[in-house]
Amino acid sequence: MTAERLRVLVTRRWPEAAEKHLAERYDVTLNAEDAPLSPAQLAQAFDAYDIICPTVSDKIDAGVIGSAPRRTRLLANFGVGFDHIDIAACKTTNIAVTNTPGVLTDATADLAMALILTAARRTGEGERELRDGRWSGWRPTHLMGRSLSGKTLGLVGFGRIAQATAHRAHHGFGMNILYYSRSAAAQDIEKKLGAKRMASLEELLHKSDMVSLHVPGGAETSNMIGSREIAAMKSGAILVNTARGGVIDHEALAVALKSGALSAAGLDVYPEEPIVPASLLGLENVVLLPHLGSATEETREAMGLRAAANVDAFASGSPLPDHIA
Ligand code: NAP
């Protein structure tokens, strides 16, 4: 089979340059309307396409993949997180999976800082007040938030995005950095970022003024932050999540935000997107963003071209640059 004849499905609208790259080389089906595919449509695609390019909005579970070998041989995911794909089922059916690590690190770290700042400085509350016509003018005690300088930021997970966030927080905002992950970072990285590893999640939560989550989603990290962990946090601490929604028990978070046990939170991701937990929607002290971590023009184009590079490698029989399974 020549590379030109490979059938490729791109499940959602991609930046133009990345769609063009694929369309010039393969028999590509694009999704101009950008409508999410149903589980039945996804399941059918496994018999119709050699390569599927999915993303986080496509739940590719064992039911979609099936147990028998299918036509699809590669899932070239648009995004670094792959908890929406059943990797074990892919292995069983001999389907390779790739992702797009690295190219979205800076954009996502920027957004983590945006959430930390927005939550700490109460800018969402301020903007709502102003737009509602409720602002009565400057006064010394109006909407006082928290300063970042000199505070301790605790990072849960210390991979690419957490380290980029540490760089910004430490060198840009004068924060002290603690982290928790199963393995320690190299000493030179710790030194460069002024970061200290905590022996347990509880210790990290106990010592941090603000906590930012950067672990992958999935069974191992499901509800990693629940009522017990929130109780271990400093009174009035701030919690930020740009990782995956399932990492937080959102009912426990809502209780803590209502009681003031946490002063604020900033969220970019939710367990069942695009559903946002109703218990959070009415709270002033939570910043709610619609999964914007990597949403810059530059980054989304780089992600598309990175996924396309994996498609190209597959088509030419070369090792897959971002082979995760
Ligand atoms: P990464 O480089 O693989 O880092 C993941 C970190 O999590 C590693 O330090 C890992 O270290 C740690 N970890 C994994 N399991 C853990 C556990 N059970 N307990 C404690 N630490 C654990 O990944 P990344 O590129 O930084 O991306 C992180 C996640 O961010 C992605 O998986 C994705 O879900 C999310 N993300 C979201 C957006 C967005 O738009 N909001 C954008 C990009 C990425 P150890 O293995 O040593 O524990």
Image (cartoon, rainbow, N blue to C red):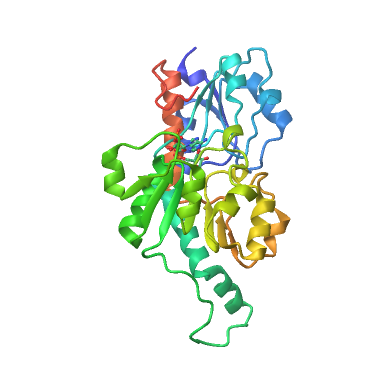
Any part of residue 104 in sight: no
Q: How many labels does the image show?
A: 0
144 vs 7, nearest the viewer: 144
> In the image, is 171 to the left or to the right of 300?
left
x and y, in percent, of residue 51 in the image: 55, 23
Could you tell me which residue is drawn at 49 percent across and 69 percent down?
121
Give the image location of residue 318, x and y in percent.
39, 17
- Residue 301 falls in image quadrant: top left
Q: In this view, does 206 lie above or below 303?
A: below
Whether residue 142 is visible to the viewer of this picture, yes or no, is: yes
Front one among 150 and 73: 150
Q: Nearer the viewer, residue 71 or 240?
A: 240
Residue 105 position by quadrant: top left
Q: Quick check: 226 above or below 278?
A: above
- Image coordinates of residue 64 in percent, x first then y, are 69, 25
Name the residue at 33% across, 61% down.
Answer: 174
Residue at image location 32% in from the left, 60% down from the top: 172
Residue depicted at x 66% and y 51%: 250
